[in-house]
Amino acid sequence: MQIVWSSTKGSRRIEHLGSAATDAEVELLKAAGRQKLLAGQGELDLGLQPPAAAGGPLHITSSRMGHLWDSLSAAYDALDFDTAVGDEVFRQLVLARIIEPTSKADAPRVIAEAGITPPSDRTITRRLRLYSAIGFREQLAAACAAQVNLGPATLVLYDVTTLYFETDEGDGFREPGFSKERRLEPQITVGLLSDANGFPLMVHAFEGNKAETKTMLPTLRSFMDTHGLSDVVIVADAGMVSEANMAAIEAAGLSYILGAKMPRVPYVIDQWRTDHPDQDIPDGLTLTARWPGGPSTKGKDVTTFYQYAHDRGRRTIKGIEAQVAKAEAAVAGKASVKRNRFVQLSGGSRSVNRALEEKAKSLAGWKAYVTNVADPNPEMVIGSYRRLFQIERSFRMAKSDLRARPIYHRKQDSIEAHLSIVFAAMAVAHWIEQVTGWSIKRFVKTARRYRTFTIAAGEHTITAVDPVPADLAQTLDAIKGRLQAH
């Protein structure tokens, strides 16, 4: 297609616009030609209603976050969530939470801004009861479990967090309890089970006043019953394990790698100091203590590894000395008595507990890891325990990127439905992060800028896209490659 014009008699100038192979491309070239012909020309106002602007800009009939929505939707399908639950409204709520965490009432706005036709508020409200059902979340958990090839030796991580509510009174489910954030509002306790890489496998909600140590076994039993597992290797922090909890884990015959508390100086550490009286403890020194299995441990030997880290010891000693200084000031009457483990009260007198100070310093730098795994080695056990940062990272994702905290929910059905949506969103976000190497926050922030447009050109419809930068294009190619391999 060309534009031919002349300004002098007998002379012609030709401008080539391009070539077209389809009717739609012809319309685009015509539109471009009209815009060039009318460029810079004024418009005489005769008070008449103008016809459709022949040389005006083309109209965008629709716009969507094509790259972002399609990538998240592809991850959702790669996890087989569509097969597991088969609910398009649930898909939209999950993806909307990743794009912009907001309330259920505001979710249709996020979906519409993404260029997708949203469900109505009434449809969302009706579906919440379905999403809160135990069977619904079990189907999601089964789809997640299928991604990690579960077996008797599967390493699973467990931790808990609390979600508080903007209310003053408990209702039996939302109840005041121990809060890591030191909040007084009613809360619920949420237990999360993940694989060794932090990929979510199961989430359970408990009453806000339920002790954290009493949440692990119910979650584990539910997980194992759901997937027909006779054993898994559970990894948890020392705060998750009370003596009763440990006894119950051993009675159930489960394998474990746990952080252990040290109420006193263990014999192996005391013996090493006796054998090396004038030697500094080497950084990374690992000592081992073993106990043969018996009826209470289902015949499994129990091994504890004690490892010393110089940096850990330095930080611990610094903290102890700061607490002791405050205790001395409190005993001298120079400061008020607050919670300080080194202040010893006896009758009406105060003193600094020097025995406790000595014991605390003697244990500074040491950490204990206990396991009943057969033939354990310290590298495997300690390395597995250190993977707990993955589940902590998952909780941070849920609370920050996905804003899991259901502050304004009132009914338990709504709370449980909310957790189902957050659980699925965590899995989708984790899949994106593993495939792309980007954080989910970076991926959403970058990909949402580049949209797909539908343009009306005469009687034809044209699709156009924002050009994406090289790094995003590479990331999108990685997602496509994983899907093709899948």
Image (cartoon, rainbow, N blue to C red):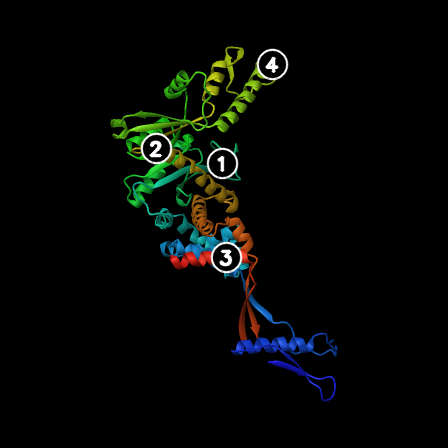
**What residue did someone put label 3 on?**
474
| Cα separation between marks 2 and 4 | 51 Å
**What residue did someone put label 2 on?**
377
| Cα separation between marks 4 and 1 | 37 Å
| Cα separation between marks 1 and 3 | 46 Å
Q: Amino acid at mark 1?
A: Pro
Question: Can residue 464 be seen by looking at this rendering?
Answer: yes
Mark 4 or mark 1, which has the lower sequence index? 1
For residue 159, what is the image quadrant? top left
**What residue did someone put label 1 on?**
186
Question: Can residue 120 be seen by looking at this rendering?
Answer: no
Q: Position of residue 455 (x, y in %)?
A: 56, 70
Q: Position of residue 413 (x, y in %)?
A: 43, 46
| Cα separation between marks 3 and 2 | 40 Å
In the image, residue 247 above or below residue 110 = above
> Closer to the camera: disc 2 or disc 4?
2
| SS for callout 1 | loop
The label on residue 333 is 4
